[in-house]
Image (cartoon, helix red, strand yellow):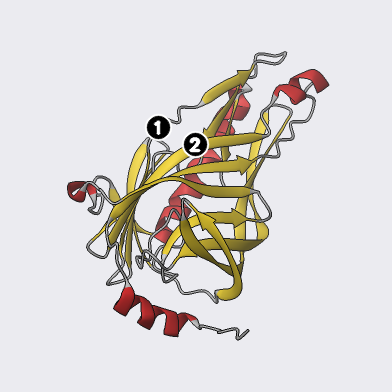
Amino acid sequence: MKKTICTLPALLVLLSVYGQQKQGKVVYERTTQMEIHIQGLADDMAQSLPRSHKDKLEVLFANDQSLRRTVEDNTPEELAEPEGGMQIHMVMAGAGDVTYTNLATGQIVEGTEFGAKNYIIADSVRHPNWKLTGATTTILNYPCQQAVMQRIGKRSSATMENGKLETKEVADTANIVVWFTPSIPVSAGPEYQGQLPGLILGIDINNGRTVYTATALSDQTDLTAIKAPSKGKKVTRAEFEKERDKLMGGMQRSHSARAAGTIRIGQ
């Protein structure tokens, strides 16, 4: 039996010739594993803290464009009130974000809210070194291929000690596994839009730390919704991160003063 190895550039050419569905909507379930450590918290209270968080997102795509947004309200969940009146709230990072991608030009426009302020972040599609492994699976009756890559960067880590919330960036190396279907030759997905030659139906980040699973796929979509967000202060990614760090510093001082904490969970 011959084994044919198809590189990403060659696969892109084949898809442009044989591609079929070019618009639709995908609903994903996102599961995020959480590690929360609060010094001085009683064992029974610590055991009551959730170990994972689930939410749903949808991706609309058509006309070489895509839009990612949440499909349910992810309001902060008050979990417990230990001795001393400290209240703990959980918020999913990016719960209300909207991400628009022009797949033809590589332009990304993200609308996000942080610290009661709205921001519009301009960015562009990145092109990391994805590798096709040859592994295959089926998701929602679509044949999928596996692509992997390693992302080296930073992530936020939150800890609470003596009623004081501390947030800092830590080094983070993530192993990414993606399943995409060449049967739908649209480079859309809940993450890594514009990077792979087919619709992304599954993602596993760091052996289950964050998992996206497609649960429904339709060839119908809301064309009027697929547009760049426009409400908010326009900033670059670097400018947003600078303002975010400044706001987080103020939030930490405020939480420390009233012995309360909001833990923001992200990937």
Determine whether label 1 and label 2 are within 8 Å by CB: yes
Can the viewer see residue 221 in this picture?
yes
Instruction: Tell me what residue is drawn at x 42 percent, y 71 percent.
Output: 197
Element assignment for label 2: strand
Return the mark for residue 185: none
Residue 144: give x, y in percent of width and height.
Answer: 50, 63
Residue 94: give x, y in percent of width and height.
Answer: 45, 43
Instruction: Tell me what residue is drawn at x 47 percent, y 80 percent.
Output: 8
Q: 10 Å neighbourhood of mark 1: few (<14), some, or many (≥20)? A: few
Q: Say whether disc 1 or disc 2 marks the residue closer to the N-terminus.
A: 2
Q: Nearest the camera: 198 or 51?
A: 198
Element assignment for label 1: loop
When the figure is inspected, residue 185 is found, relative to residue 52, above or below; the finding is below
**Quarter of the image where one finds residue 159:** top right
Given the current orientation, which residue lies at the most extreme right position?
Answer: 43
Q: Which residue is mark 1?
A: 72
**Quarter of the image where one finds residue 48:** top right
Residue 25: give x, y in percent of width and height.
Answer: 32, 49
Instruction: Tell me what residue is drawn at x 57 percent, y 75 percent.
Output: 132
Q: Which residue is mark 2?
A: 55
Disc 1 residue type?
Glu
Can the viewer see residue 230 in this picture?
no
Disc 2 residue type?
Asp
Residue 209: give x, y in percent of width and height.
Answer: 65, 48
Instruction: Tell me what residue is drawn at x 66 percent, y 29 percent.
Output: 50
